[in-house]
Amino acid sequence: MFSFESGLAAFPALVRMMATGGRRRSSESEELEQGSSGESEEEMEDSSEDDQENEAEIQRLEEQLSISVYDYNCHVDLIKLLRQEGELEKLRSARQKMSELFPLTEELWLDWLKDEIRMAGKASDRENVYELFEKAIKDYICPEIWLEYAQYSIGGIGQQGGIEKARGIFDRALTAVGLHMTKGVAIWEAFREFENAILGTLQPSVGSILTPEQQEMVNAQLERIHTLFKRQLGVPLLDMETTYAEYEEWADEPNKSVTEVYKKAQQQMEKRKPYEENLLVADPPKLAEYQAYIDFEVKDGDPARIQIIFERALSENCLVPELWARFTLYLDRQLKIKDLVVSAHERAVRNCPWIVGLWKRYLLALERHQVEHKIIIETFEKALNAGFIQATDYVELWQAFLDYLRRRVNFSQDSSQELEELRSAFSRGVDYLKQDIEQRFGESGDPSCTILQNWARIEARLCKNIQKARELWDRIMTKGNATYANMWLEYYNLERAHGDPQHCRKALHRAVQCTTDYPEHVCDVLLAFERLEGSLEDWDLAVEKTETRLNRVNQQRTKAAEKEALLTKQEEEKNVQRKKGRSAKKAAKKAQKQALPGDKRKADQEEWGVEIDQPNKKPRAGELEEAEEEDMSAECGLFGRENNTKILETPALQKQKAVAATRNKVLHDNSKDDLTVFVSNLSYSMPNPEERLKEVFESIGQIAEIRPIYSNRGLFRGYCYVEFQEEKAAADALRLDRQELEGRPMFVSPCVDKAKNPDFKVFRYSTSLEKHKVFISGLPFSCTKEALEEICKEHGTLKEIRLVTNRSGKPKGLAYAEYENEAQASQAVLKMDGMVVKDHPISVAISNPPQRKQTSKVEASRSSGSLLSRQVYGARGKGRTQLALVPRALQRLPASEANTENGTLRDQDGNSKGDSSIIKETKKMTNADFAKMLLKK
């Protein structure tokens, strides 16, 4: 049935490698140690200078790590330099320290393993390498590390039990990564090569005959290889067809059971193929694609495949806490295998130590699987040093730990070691929040004293120690909670359940005197209590106290209302005075404009060299018609009087008006929006905007046109359009946004019509929570970007530093620093918050801008309606005695254009139109148009 020769001749290279074992690796180690023995003197001098620089850099990095041990990039740089220098002992120590703090990447582990393999010459060294491999496979499920582990184990098959040890490692590798659809096939093939090589060693020489024992060993080995083929073909992997073809070639007659499992695996592979293709074409980190793949596997329900897709996703998204939380929750609820669950929780907190929820689940998992109490204590201590970003996170952590300690206590005993440990932990937790957390965050994170409340309830209910509970509650009230009704009612309920009526009455009387938020409710509770428990004297005293208290509260509220009303009245009077002042100014300006323009116009015309020829009397209609024919551009006065002033313009005035008229007419072609950027916030005093902006943007791409915007008087208005010849250049120009130009930040944005795209936002920075970015406030105005960068880069790899300025370019004392990941950002918050920069204490927090208030559509429509009414009737609407100064001929619209019904404008089809359509359709008329219309009448 099977071909013996195929197993014998297929893998001679692997057989030779196993025969030589670790000798090749030891020779490589010798070559590495001999190193530079053949170098020339000049090369050695050059290398000595480099060595001195590297040694100085190594010393600097070691000092930096002594200050900030959680600096990930500093660890990586130190390891790289030590590896270059060949400092093997220091390199090993540096790697061990980093592996204790962080999970290492695949590249770091492979470099470490290869270095240790080269240096392993003794049997004891080989065992150390095995231990290192065991540590490496715990950080992430990595097929490359498992393959290296299995291949390294092959070198030890010459030792006693070496073959079985190698087989065991291969089996573990298949369990861990054999289901990996894209990379798992390498493990399967390596395992089959290993077994085929062993089969080759069992084959008889030419002309010899196998003994029954040898034949039995050969048959057993053939069965192993056949089983491996069957197992592999039953797993949906990419390129399964090639494996099946190898099986057909290896076996004389393919087994039907193998063919059946192969076809089923093919069907499963086709279902998963779209998800694998999406992962191949997606850009890192591929989180959405992995989430969809996980949803599919969870729905399919195979635990092994669910685990492997989670592991694949986590290897590329190890800093996504939500993914770790989902994975650990699945393991807690579905698999419930101790080693697997505990290992996953440990890796979760090592990758995302700043997430308190992961630590709480880790503690619960340790308790659920009955891990030693000492290990749980050590885990909790690690969590306290994890560096959470909020004070409330520490409260949650302490509460979870105290819940665990409470569940260990047997309260049927009067005293026990567990009870004393619980009380000691409560006391330590309260002190920790009061001292360490308040000093770090400025608040304890527990203003309601939930930990003290739980402690008091445990003492009263479980320990039957009501006196201790009263002492604890007294501490709660002295921490600023005595004015809240709910705190007094909590204490009252505690006394009601475990105390006596005398202390209940005392608590309620104190509550009536101290409560400021809901005194009526506390008074009602006191009266209800006296109805059930009190005597007549108690009732009378309660009524007297409640009435006195409520009268005092009402008086205080009345005074507060009167004070508020007085302030409101004063504010209204100030507003009236402001309106009167504005009205007086407007009236003065209006009177100045409506005054006969003779003197002012005469003065202006004399200043410009104007000849004045004023009429002595009102011209007749015929003369007016002749004047209209001669010059239709003559102006008419407000009341129909013609002003025949003829202005003789100087050449300079004509040139200035021509330039202004040309500049005002800047037409923008909307079809070229993709080629154009809008540049604003420029200095009004920029002498030649076109040439200046051309210098700035010509490095981006070929410019087609620069169109500055000018006012009616020919002054630059501070913004312009820059049109490129290619769309790519316009997109690249957006990188210059907020670049400083002549002392001001230049705003560069896409050319988008906001009337057609009202939701378009020019602001390019995120306004939501960004855990990898920190917000810095309180900076001195003299702090530069370079100086701040020097401070921030000590805590991680910086991607961007942005100083916040106003429109004129002056700093606001605020900044944003973006780090490579969330861990570095949280470390920067811990180290920099409260730091003094040039005598200014700064505040540092994770970036989470407050939400802007959004104006509702109803309010927007009301505001637009009020604006429209002002445009039609004036600022105060249409008064009853307001005179219409527009000629009646202009007030009537042609019947063909519109008609009205009940004050609503309607078109020819009878459809109503709003005021906005009237304003839109009514064409603006010049003075000449007014004159023509009057003459026609």
Image: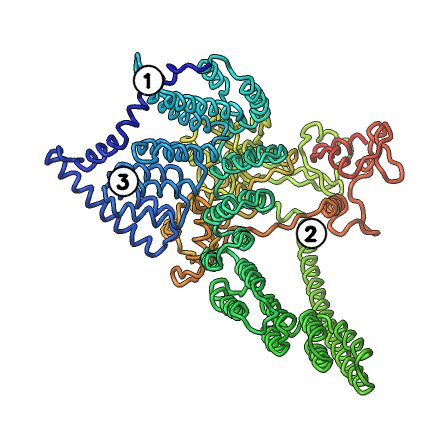
Which residue type carries mark 1? Pro
The residue sitting at 39% across, 16% down in the picture is 4
Answer yes or no: do the residues labelled 2 and 1 have beta carbons within 8 Å? no
Write down the residue under mark 3.
Answer: 123
Answer yes or no: do the residues labelled 1 and 3 have beta carbons within 8 Å? no
Q: Nearer the viewer, mark 3 or mark 2?
A: 3
Write down the residue under mark 1.
Answer: 204
Answer yes or no: do the residues labelled 3 and 2 have beta carbons within 8 Å? no
The residue sitting at 32% across, 32% down in the picture is 157
Which residue type carries mark 3? Ala
Q: Secondary structure at mark 1?
A: loop
Q: Secondary structure at mark 3?
A: helix
How are the colours assigned in the image?
rainbow
Q: How much space separates mark 3 and mark 2, taking CA atoms?
A: 104 Å
Q: Residues within 10 Å of mark 1 (few under 14, many from 20)?
A: some
Q: Nearer the viewer, residue 342 or 491?
A: 342
Res 640 visible: yes
Q: Nearer the viewer, mark 2 or mark 1?
A: 1
